[in-house]
């Protein structure tokens, strides 16, 4: 099977012409072989082992591809591979890259060093790993029910490797080639997280120097198995001046029930690629390679990243040993048991734990976990954690950004205090995009004298676009407007609710007269109510409805006290699109404001009680229905038994 090379289609003709000049090629290959062998001998003690040390395909008299024009090695000594990611890109041979020109036509020349430089977009190892989980979540539409993240062992040297496996639709041979190439993406659905066709390369190369992929695909009764190797070690140790990706494919023979070579190309190409896989992957025989498909089944994908990068201390960056049910960032060991109680509570909050605990990060990575889908980490299911469920004194704020008078989208922000407030020194917004967490606990304000302390929000902003590593957003005008609004939202919420957690409430300055009319018109509108649902028992529904109506009346009474110098901050781009927090105006007495807030909280508590009662009634109804079905089944059995005696 022909290796994938990152060359344009037009280069194929020059390849064939190059192959025809057999004698010249053999001379070049012999010269390259001798130089590579000399360099291998010089640096064999410095380079890490990957496969049979000192051996290459050229040592066996074979080129990594029969298309020598594509896979020829450079005439320079290959660089040793550094095990520290941020230093592995220091490749300086003192000369410029040799750009080939064949028959007068230039072609795209992608050096293997691009694999490393492309991966530097991921500053954080967990951010890179999340990209691979996104691919698995996108496979839910193809039947995926789980993604498994675990430690595995590289049988070559017994070192730790990272496993990511899902039971999605898998990739057909051509799909595998697109996955290993740059800029190709098959994800056309609007709900798909992946978009740029670059995440697999950046994430795997950020976590380790090498990755091997096994994918099984079933379509129209035809099952294929594909294996692909993207190896930075292989390319740099062999001194290639362009990216070569060996792949092999198999196809199920329905008559014999066995996997056979998928003959898209000649046998020599297949043997060449298979030989490279056996030499540079963790598996030294074809049987070992095929054995990796046994736990995949008829469809799914398994990714194994090996030769994992090390930190500055020389330890593997991913720590598999500190917690048998977690993967941690090595070197970040926080001994919270020796800290004071208040500081220990702060450090153990998920806002801090997600920085070094993969389990904590994955628990909030998706706003909504897809139905019938699980993330399994080290053999244990990751419990989904909705941050909004742990807030108190919650408010819902609707925001519709405008540009040039046109609404560009809308988002509902859930905002409140952390349940441990004011003890925690944590604040910020968790901003999701298409269900995927982009910015966790984004501190839009740097508070002074505790203003904003403990205020946390959750929102899904699909009208702005994330950058390539999905750890930030593109700094567009829409993003800047959102940032301004979230700052205002934080201060508004704090100034009118901080008294609920023991601080002295602050009063907002009056807005200018120019905006007073539009604000007065806006606050007369109906309050925004999130997640209206229909309820089962009519009694609970009627009581819940009357309580919500009473809460609305309290909110209307509260707003009716606001004068033209109302307490909400407004601006010229979102005056009619910001749902103000429902709080007393400046002219309302402190006692009246307190009574209104207490009344609303009381009504909200009653709503929660009725919702709890409704849930209990539904569970009881379910149990009664089950008992009824069992009784009916028993009645039918007894009736049949009675008829048999008649």
Image: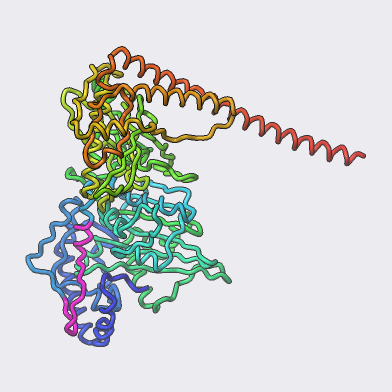
Residue 64 or residue 15, whichever sits in front: 15
In the image: residue 396, left or right of residue 49: right
Horizontally, is 307 left or right of 525 in the view? Answer: left
Which quarter shows the C terminus?
Answer: top right
Is 566 within the magenta?
A: no
Q: Residue 497 versus residue 268: which sits nearer the camera?
A: 497
Q: Residue furthest top?
A: 591
Identity of the residue furthest to the left in this view:
94
In front here: 270 or 477? 477
- Which of the pair 570/159 is nearer the observer? 570
Residue 146, percent from left and from top: 45, 48
Residue 377 place in picture, x, y as percent: 39, 42
Residue 184 in percent (x, y) is at 32, 64
Magenta span of residues: 100-118
Residue 356 visible here: no
User: Is residue 25 something one can see in this rendering?
Assistant: yes
Give the image quarter of residue 448.
Answer: top left
């Amino acid at each position: 099977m022909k290796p994938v090379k990152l060359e344009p289609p037009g280069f194929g003709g020059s390849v064939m012409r190059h192959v025809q000049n057999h004698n010249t090629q053999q001379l070049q290959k012999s010269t390259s072989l001798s130089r590579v062998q000399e360099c291998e001998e010089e640096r064999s003690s410095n380079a890490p082992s990957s496969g049979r040390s000192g051996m290459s395909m050229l040592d066996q008299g074979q080129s990594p591809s029969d298309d020598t024009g594509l896979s020829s090695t450079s005439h320079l000594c290959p660089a040793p591979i550094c095990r520290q990611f941020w230093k592995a890109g220091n490749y300086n041979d003192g000369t410029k890259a040799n750009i080939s020109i064949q028959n007068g036509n230039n072609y795209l020349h992608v050096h293997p060093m691009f694999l490393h430089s492309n991966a530097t977009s991921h500053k954080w190892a967990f951010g890179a790993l999340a990209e691979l989980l996104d691919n698995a979540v996108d496979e839910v539409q193809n039947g995926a029910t789980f993604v498994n993240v675990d430690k595995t062992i590289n049988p070559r040297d017994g070192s730790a490797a990272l496993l990511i496996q899902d039971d999605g639709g898998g990739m057909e041979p051509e799909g595998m080639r697109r996955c290993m190439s740059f800029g190709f993406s098959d994800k056309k659905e609007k709900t798909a997280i992946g978009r740029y066709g670059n995440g697999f390369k950046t994430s795997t190369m950020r976590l380790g120097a090498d990755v091997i992929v096994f994918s099984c695909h079933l379509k129209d009764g035809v099952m294929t198995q594909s294996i692909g190797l993207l190896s930075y070690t292989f390319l740099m140790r062999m001194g290639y001046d362009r990216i070569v990706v060996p792949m092999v494919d198999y196809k199920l023979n329905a008559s014999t029930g066995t996997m056979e070579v998928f003959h898209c190309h000649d046998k020599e190409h297949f043997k060449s690629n298979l030989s490279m896989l056996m030499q540079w992957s963790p598996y030294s025989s074809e049987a070992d390679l095929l054995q990796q498909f046994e736990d995949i089944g008829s469809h799914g994908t398994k990714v194994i990243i090996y030769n994992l990068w090390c930190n500055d201390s020389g330890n593997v960056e991913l720590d598999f040993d500190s917690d048998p049910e977690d993967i941690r960032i090595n070197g970040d060991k926080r001994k919270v048991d020796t800290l004071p109680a208040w500081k220990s509570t702060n450090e153990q909050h998920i806002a801090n734990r997600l920085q070094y605990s993969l389990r904590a990060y994955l628990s909030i990575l998706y706003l909504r976990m897809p139905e019938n889908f699980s993330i399994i980490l080290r053999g244990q299911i990751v419990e989904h954690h909705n941050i909004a469920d742990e807030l108190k004194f919650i408010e819902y704020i609707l925001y519709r950004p405008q540009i040039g008078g046109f609404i560009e989208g809308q988002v509902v922000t859930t905002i409140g205090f952390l349940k441990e407030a004011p003890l925690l020194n944590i604040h910020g917004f968790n901003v999701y995009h298409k269900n995927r967490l982009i910015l966790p606990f984004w501190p839009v304000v740097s508070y002074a004298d505790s203003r904003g302390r403990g205020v946390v929000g959750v929102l899904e902003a699909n009208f702005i676009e994330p950058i390539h590593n999905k750890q930030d957003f593109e700094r567009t005008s829409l993003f800047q407007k959102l940032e301004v609004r979230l700052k205002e939202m934080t201060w508004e919420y704090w100034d009118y609710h901080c008294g609920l957690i023991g601080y002295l409430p602050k009063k907002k300055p009056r807005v200018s007269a120019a905006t007073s009319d539009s604000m007065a018109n806006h606050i007369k509108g109906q309050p925004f109510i999130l997640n209206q649902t229909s309820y089962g028992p009519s009694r609970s529904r009627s009581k819940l409805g009357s309580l919500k109506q009473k809460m609305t009346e309290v909110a209307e009474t509260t707003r009716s006290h606001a004068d033209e110098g109302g307490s909400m901050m407004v601006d010229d781009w979102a005056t009619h699109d910001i749902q103000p927090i429902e709080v007393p105006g400046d002219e309302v007495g402190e006692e009246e404001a307190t009574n209104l807030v207490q009344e609303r909280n009381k009504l909200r508590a009653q709503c929660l009680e009725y919702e709890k009662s409704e849930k209990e009634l539904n569970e009881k109804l379910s149990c009664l229905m089950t008992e009824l079905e069992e009784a009916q089944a028993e009645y039918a059995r007894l009736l049949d038994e009675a008829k048999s005696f008649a």
